[in-house]
Image (tube, rainbow, N blue to C red):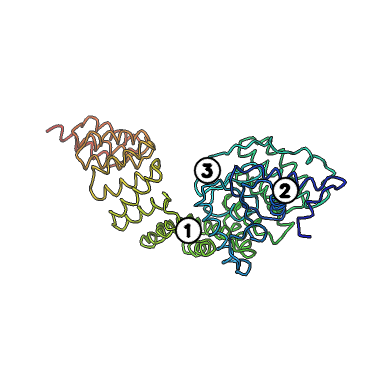
Amino acid sequence: ERPGCRLLRRGGPDGEGDVAEVYGKNLLRTPEKNGILFVAGDNATFITSYLKRVELLRPDLTIYDESGNVFENIYGDDLKYLGFADYYKRVNETQWNILSTAAKPIYCVTGTNILNAANVNNKAYGLLFRLSAKPLAKALKFNLASYDTGSFENTAIRKDFLTRETLALFYFSLAECSFESGDNAAAERYYQKVETIGPDMDMIQNNISISYIKREMYDRAIPYAQKAISINPKFGDAYNNLGIIHYRKGNFNEAVKCYLKAISISGKDSYLYNLGAVYRQSNLSDEAIRVYEQALAVNPYASKLYYIIGNVYLDKKDFPRAIEIYNKGLSVEPNSFELLTNLGVAYAATGRSKEGVEAFKRSIAMSPNTPETHYGLGTVYYGLKDYQNAIPAFTEALRLNPSMVQGWVSLALSYNAAGDLARSAECYERIVKLRPENIEDWNNLGIAYGVKGDFEKSITAWQQALKLDPKYRNAALNIEKVKQMMKK
C-alpha cells in the first residue's frame, strides 16, 4: 500500500475515506477549465490521481507531480538519478518553461517547488495558488462557499494522522484565501481550526508562519516557525522562514545563522537568495554575489536573480560586469522592464549612450507607466546635450510622479540649457514647494529668477534661504551682487 493511498478507503465506520474523496473533489473543483495543476505530497498527488484516472473527473485538467512518478514525467527519466543541484535545476527549468509559455491558467498546491521559485508570482485561489510569470492582481476572487465542507465538521474522523493533515491543509487554504480577500476575521477562524486539527504537524505550523510573514505580523509568525522546528529539526523551510523574520526585524546575525542552517539541510535556491539579501544589506557585496551565483547554479531560470546580481555590481560601479549580468537575465526573460531599465543605467554610466537609449526605450515599451524609466531615458539624452529629447522624457516622468524632486531638477537644468529660462524658473518653484526646508533649492530658485532678470523675486528667494539658515553665505553674496547690479 502506497503512503497516502489508505485515505481513499470507502465505508469506514467514521467516514474517514470520505474525507479524501471530498477534499479531492473540492481541489479539482478549483482550477478553471483546461488549466494546469502542479501537485506535491502524498495527499494531493494520490487523491487527484485516483479521482482523475478512476472516477474520470476533470479530463480537461493537466496535472504534473514534481517527482514524475505518478502523472506524466515531464522532467526526464534520469531525474531521480541527479544530484541535488542538478535535480532542482531540471525541475526549475521545466516548470519555468511551462509557466512562461503556456496560455492556460496554471495552479499549484501548497508545498510545491514552483510556489517558492524566485521569479514566480502567486496568489491564493481557493485550495490552490494561481501562478504567473507576470505580476497578478492584488486579489483573485474565489467563492469558498462552493466547497463541500459538511462532513469535515465531524470530529470523530480526526483520528488518523493523514486524515487530520488533509483537513488541516484544507482549512489552511481557506484561511489564506480569506486573508487575500481582506476577510481577516474569517482567516483567523480558519487558523483556529487548523491549530486544533494539526498541532503536531511541522508543515502546517510552518505554513501558518509563512502566512503571518506575508502580512508582516512577525511576532505572530515566530512561534509557529519555532514549533515546526521542534517537531522536525531537519525542516529547512522552517529555518528559512525564521531567517526571513529575523531579517525583516533587522536581526541580521540571527538571520544569517538561520539561513545557513537551512542551506546545510537543503541548498534550495530560495534559501541562498535570502542569505544573499542579508549580505547585501550588510554591505558585504562580494559575499552577496557569491551566494546569489550559487542560487543561479541551482535555478538559472530565475531572472530576478540576474537583476539583483547586476544591481550589486551596479552598486560597486562595476558597470561592464553589470551589463553582462543584465543581458544574461534578458536571455531568460527578454521583456523584463526592470532588467532593461538598469541595463540602460549601466550603459549610460559607461558612455554607451546609444545602447542606453535603446534599453530605456525597450523598457518603456514593456512598462510605459514607470516614471523612473522615463527619467533614466531623460538623463541619457541630457548627457548627450540632446535637450529636445531630454525635456519630453523628464516631463513624462513627472506626469507619472509629480513628487519626483530630482525629475524637476533635471527638467529645470534642461530648460536652462535649452535657453527657456522662464520654464526653468517654474520648475524650481515646484521644487521649493516639494522641499520648502532645503536652502539650496531656494538659492537655485533665486539664481533662476536672476538669470531671466527678475531680481526682486531673486532677492525674495535668497532671503527665504537666509531665514532657514542665517549663516548661508551663498544667498547673502547673491543678494549683495544683485543689489549692486540694480544700482547700476
At which x and y percent is residue 137?
A: 53, 40
What residue type is disc 1 on? Answer: Asn
Mark 3 or 1, which is nearer the eye? Answer: 3
- Element assignment for label 2: loop
> Which residue lies under the disc numbered 2?
55
Mark 2 or 3, which is nearer the eye? Answer: 2
The residue drawn where x is 25% and y is 37% is 424
Front residue (pair 28, 328) = 28
Looking at marks 3 and 1 on the same chain, the residue that comes earlier in the sequence is marked by: 3
Distance of label 1 from label 2 (alpha carbons): 57 Å
Query: Which quarter of the picture shows residue 332?
Result: bottom left
Distance of label 3 from label 1 (alpha carbons): 32 Å
Mark 1 or 2, which is nearer the eye? Answer: 2
> Which residue lies under the disc numbered 3?
136
Q: Is residue 250 left or right of residue 49?
A: left
How packed mark 3 is, by other alpha carbons closer than 10 Å (few <14, some 14-19, many 20 or more), is few
At which x and y percent is residue 479?
A: 23, 36
Q: Residue furthest top?
A: 456
Q: Give the number of the disc on residue 283.
A: 1
- Element assignment for label 1: loop
Looking at marks 2 and 3 on the same chain, the residue that comes earlier in the sequence is marked by: 2
Distance of label 2 from label 3 (alpha carbons): 33 Å
What residue type is disc 2 on? Answer: Glu
Q: Residue furthest right?
A: 13
